[in-house]
Image: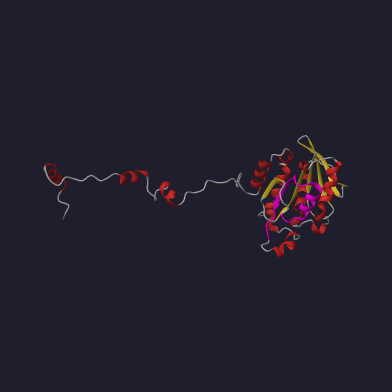
Amino acid sequence: MLVIAGLGNPGRQYAGNRHNIGFMAVDAIHRRHSFSPWSKKFKAEISEGEIAGEKVLLIKPQTYMNLSGESVGEAMRFYKLQPSDIVAIYDELDLAPAKARIKVGGGHGGHNGVKSLDAHCGRDYRRLRLGIGHPGNKDLVHNYVLGDFAKVDQQWLEPMLDALADNLEMLVKREDSQLMNKLALAVGGKEDEDKPKPAKPSGANAAAQKPAGKSHIHQARNSAQPKKLPTTGPMAEMLKKMFGNKED
């Protein structure tokens, strides 16, 4: 069984907040697939379904963000699951908007919902982080995350959430790299865009590898030492008759 936990705050006043992108993701999944109607259990709203032959539990903790782990931990213990059976979806300040990353374990990065999950579920669960960007000043963070997404954000937010829902089977089957590619393509990125690229040569290496704008033919011509023409003898006299005296 896989538990997919979207993190957020309950209540209509928080529904459009950046901090609630985890709820939005789980709602998109619920709309796209044949999950049961939402019900209340484990201090949360839950819904059950089956994806790729595996039972999946969607969960939206109703404890408020800072206590999310109480809800997810209760569900984990009820079903006798391990941290590896949990995927948490949440907002990430340190990722640019429209970026997504997934990994197992790691730090909480100051995210109170993740701190709570770590405390109640252990740390070795999968973390799907959806970038919301940073306001640029830590004093602005509180109002920023509890502020609604701007209209311009809808250009990437909806395609990303739709792509996540469309490719949920990859998440369930733990095809994480393929899923990241799908999300990147959905928002206009490229596959493997973070794959390290070969470093460009610099200094003497660059000069050696890249001629200064000259063709290989031109270089070959210049590399050959010019041959000196004879100045005396029969050959010199013949050349003077053919081409004339160039000294004038």
Q: Is residue 70 visible?
A: yes
Name the one closer to the observer, 161 or 60.
Answer: 60
In the image as oriented, which residue stretches furthest toward the bottom?
A: 139
- Identify the image quadrant of the N terminus: top right
Q: Can residue 161 be seen in this view?
A: no
Q: Residue 146's image quarter? A: bottom right
Q: Where is residue 230 in the image (x, y as percent from the top left)?
A: 16, 45
Q: Say how many tags the image has.
A: 0
Q: For the magenta stretch, what is the residue range?
A: 109-134
Q: Where is residue 103 in the image (x, y as percent from the top left)?
A: 70, 45
Name the one closer to the observer, 237 or 122.
Answer: 122
Position of 196 with respect to 240 (left or right) is right
Q: Residue 154's image quarter? A: bottom right
Q: Residue 137's image quarter? A: bottom right
- Identify the image quadrant of the C terminus: bottom left
**Residue 65, magenta (yes or no):** no
